[in-house]
Image (spheres, rainbow, N blue to C red):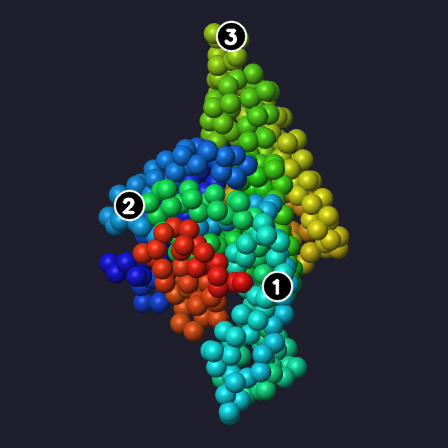
Amino acid sequence: MNSNDVIVGLDIGTSKVRVIIGEISNGSLNIIGVGSSDSEGIKKGAIVDIEQTVQSIRNAIDHAERMVGITIDEVYVGISGNHIDLQSSHGVVAVSSEDKEISDADIDRVIQASKVIALPPDREIIDVVPKEFIVDGLAGIKVPKGMIGVRLEVSSTIITGSKTIIHNLIRTIEKSDLRIAGFILMPLAASQIALSKDEMNLGVVLVDIGEGATTISVFEHGGLVKTTVIPIGGEYITNDISIGLRTQMDIAEQVKLKYGIANFNEANEDIKFKVPRIGSNVDKEYTQIDLAHIVEPRVREIFQIIREEVYKLGFTKEIPGGYVLTGGVVSMKGMLSVAQEELLPAARIAIPDYIGVRDPSFINGVGIVEYASNIFFKPNNLQKRALSSNSKSRNSSPFERVKNWFSEFI
């Protein structure tokens, strides 16, 4: 196996750390390995204890290495959170060649020109995503190479994040004995798997409901236009079960995963289970209907809050593509039917179409690998050189590599 053809994605979540290994063979991507471990040191998607998070990452890496039989030393890292901000930018250059044919060098220069923006000292640029190119006033061009023109422009989205959060993430990855091949924004990664081009062009809301937080991302005209994170997720459901059944949180989590159902109408009274109650040495028996009475109100509230957040982002009219749901929480039975009632218009659940990872919880990890394969491993890609400069300095110190990686954007 050629290590140059292997892509490793790292998804650090509140409940799980997942490592996805992809291999490019004959131009197509295959998922060949998966590693996971329980998250420690992560709260609502943010690192609160570096040493515990390092151990969780190493456990997931070791699991993936044993499955595939390779050594992992470089990963593409997913990043998300409320510190993420999107900023529109514009770049303009004159076509340099005498025959006025647009070359890769012209494209690189115009993308560089769009990166010249004023940034507060506490912000870093994570990614630059070209939305469209304009050649002598002709807009809507995706690949201008080879066209004839005098003036080349680009409309791009600059993705920035908190310098403190980014550098703490960098330190955590480096302490895990891994190199960072690149950062990838989670909604962009997930969109590779979850959304169609038509949905992204018409307008669609991608909702990733994790254990500690929910990420809401709106796509229009083929690109990401808004994203936000709300600190509500599956742990709220677990907490309600713990209170309702008067049992410990770890028991409540097990009950949620095994018997949880979000829609009372789909619950089965013949499904019964016993749980130890706090303050009692006698287990009490419950039915799935009892559990649904606890879970459904919280699930409906989560979807109502999601809808309100989309309105706050400025999307008050009907969204043609509806809502696409991802994340481990949406695997619970009855989630889709409740979502379809609360999130009008349509709602559906996205699942990766790869053997071994056909579960909504793998969307982000698989999306990171898919995004990296499309951006970094496709020839003549417009973002390839701009986003892979970290590989030029692998032998330097961790922070020197990061400095070099970010220097492409400033």
Which mark is in front, 1 or 3? 1
Q: Amino acid at mark 1?
A: Ile
Q: Amino acid at mark 3?
A: Ser
Residue furthest to the bottom in view is: 99
Residue 199, horizontal then vertical, whole percent: 60, 60
In which quadrant will I find the C terminus?
bottom right
Which mark is in front, 1 or 2? 1
Give me the residue at 58% from left, 49% from top: 122
Q: Is residue 313 left or right of residue 280?
A: right
Give me the residue at 48% from left, 8% from top: 282
Where disc 1 sits, the SS reads loop
Where disc 3 sits, the SS reads loop
Real-space Cα separation, disc 3 to disc 2, in angstroms: 44 Å
Is residue 206 among the parts visible in the rendering?
no
Q: Amino acid at mark 2?
A: Glu
- Disc 1 crowd rating (10 Å Cα; few below 14, some 14-19, many 20+) is some
The residue indicated by pointer 2 is: 65
Q: Quadrant of residue 288?
A: top right
Q: Quadrant of residue 336?
A: top right
Residue 316, horizontal then vertical, whole percent: 75, 52
In which quadrant will I find the N terminus?
bottom left
First in sequence: mark 3 or mark 2? 2
What's the mark number on residue 280?
Answer: 3
Real-space Cα separation, disc 1 to disc 2, in angstroms: 41 Å
Which mark is in front, 3 or 2? 2
First in sequence: mark 1 or mark 2? 2
